[in-house]
Image: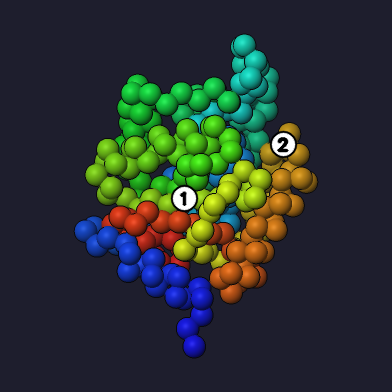
Amino acid sequence: MISRRKLIESTALLAAGSGAAKPSGRKIKVIVAGGHPGDPEYGCGGTVARYTELGHQVILLYLNRGDSGYLEKPVEDSSAVRVAEAGKACEILKATPAFAGQFNSRAVVDTAHYSAFQKIIESEKPDVVFTQWPIDGHRDHRAISTLAYDAWLGMGKRFAFYYYEVSNGEDTLMFSPTRYVDISAVEPKKRAACYAHASQTPDRYYALQSQVAKFRGVESGYAQAEAYIPHVQNPYQALPQDL
């Protein structure tokens, strides 16, 4: 009998486009875009670890530096702390940090910022981009999702494009994944990367994310998993198990 996971993943593979060559047999470049330092690690940390253990290059692209954006003037000290934490998390995951230059909770989505963000993506020439769910509760999550999607469209949909979840039930809602990555063996590395963001109460947030990973594992037949929604027009599938 075919499992639910196999049925879901087979359907997703059939739904994917076939216009571009699948990047198998070579090292690829992956970008995980998130609103703040910590978002890519919480949502995709296990998948990032899977990629880098296979020798692929991963960039964690943060929309902002985690500064105190609600204030009239961003606080530089808070930004320095968050950037240092991101650097430590990336070191654990063997990824590279990058920043899109916006401010926490003051995200701007307009013609100039669409263009600037696309230039960042173009300069990296990724094979895969992950971004946040476009109806997340936090405006910065929604902003980077929109910017990343527009860049994918502007670049002719030539790389694989996935949505990920964070704090499901609290921030991410209405997320129905079709692809899963087994993170059982790399969960300790993901945990360490998330706890590197010590200023962000990881005891609270990781507890929730751990519940999500276990639930996605129940769905997919793994001990723990991260879940994704690939765009139906992806040119190929490029999760770690696809390479």
Residue 215 lies, in percent from the top left, at 65, 64
Q: Nearer the viewer, residue 126 or 151?
A: 151
Q: Which residue does the image show at 61% across and 28% down from the upper left?
A: 66
Q: Nearer the viewer, mark 1 or mark 2?
A: 1
Q: Nearer the viewer, residue 144 or 49?
A: 144
Q: Is residue 193 visible from the viewing direction of this image?
A: no
In this rendering, position of residue 225 left or right of residue 6: right
- Read off the residue under disc 2: 200
Looking at this view, name the residue that lies furthest to the top. Answer: 72
The first of marks 1 and 2 along the sequence is 1
Looking at this view, name the residue that lies furthest to the right. Answer: 203
The residue type indicated by label 1 comes to Tyr
Q: Which residue does the image show at 46% across and 76% down from the upper left?
A: 6
Residue 166 lies, in percent from the top left, at 60, 48
The residue type indicated by label 2 comes to Gln
In this rendering, position of residue 177 left or right of residue 46: left
- Read off the residue under disc 1: 163
Q: Is residue 88 visible from the viewing direction of this image?
A: yes
